[in-house]
């Protein structure tokens, strides 16, 4: 699952792939934004942990799980 997180007042964004389902990611984001937490915490496929303050979140984009193309297009 491809995830992109926009950070307020920053031209860059976090972009990583996670093995979590879209429902799990959406639930985690919703809980962070509901006021129960101050940080959004997600992990990627390699075990890295991303912690973003909720106040700095501009957007969270949850992409579709798409297989990568291999080979040449003719």
Image (cartoon, helix red, strand yellow):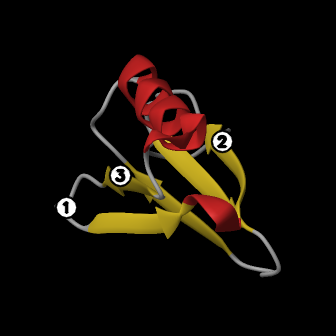
Identify the residue position indicated by label 1 in the image: 46
Residue at position x 57%, y 67% in the image: 14
Measure how far apart labels 2 and 3 are at the Cα level.
13 Å
Q: Is residue 8 left or right of residue 49?
A: right
The crowding category of the residue bearing disc 2, from other C-alpha atoms within 10 Å (few below 14, some 14 to 19, many at least 20), is: few
Q: Is residue 44 above or below residue 51?
A: above
- Ranked by sequence position, the earlier of labels 2 and 3 is 3
Identify the residue position indicated by label 3 in the image: 42
Residue at position x 30%, y 32% in the image: 20
Mark 1 vs mark 2, foreground winner is 2
Measure how far apart labels 1 and 2 are at the Cα level.
19 Å
Circle 3: element type: strand
The crowding category of the residue bearing disc 3, from other C-alpha atoms within 10 Å (few below 14, some 14 to 19, many at least 20), is: some
Q: Quick one: 47 or 36, which is closer to the camera?
A: 36
Identify the residue position indicated by label 2 in the image: 61
Q: Quadrant of the C terminus?
A: top right
Q: Position of residue 54 (x, y in %)?
A: 58, 58
Q: Is residue 68 visible?
A: no
Mark 3 vs mark 1, foreground winner is 3
The crowding category of the residue bearing disc 1, from other C-alpha atoms within 10 Å (few below 14, some 14 to 19, many at least 20), is: few
Q: Is residue 65 left or right of residue 44?
A: right
- Ranked by sequence position, the earlier of labels 1 and 2 is 1
């Amino acid at each position: 699952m491809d995830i992109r997180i926009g950070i307020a007042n920053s031209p860059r964004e976090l972009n990583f792939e996670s093995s979590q389902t879209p429902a799990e990611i959406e639930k985690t984001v919703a809980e962070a934004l509901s006021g129960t937490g101050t940080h959004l915490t997600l992990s990627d496929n390699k075990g890295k942990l991303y912690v973003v303050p909720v106040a700095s979140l501009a957007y969270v984009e949850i992409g579709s799980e798409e297989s990568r193309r291999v080979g040449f297009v003719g």
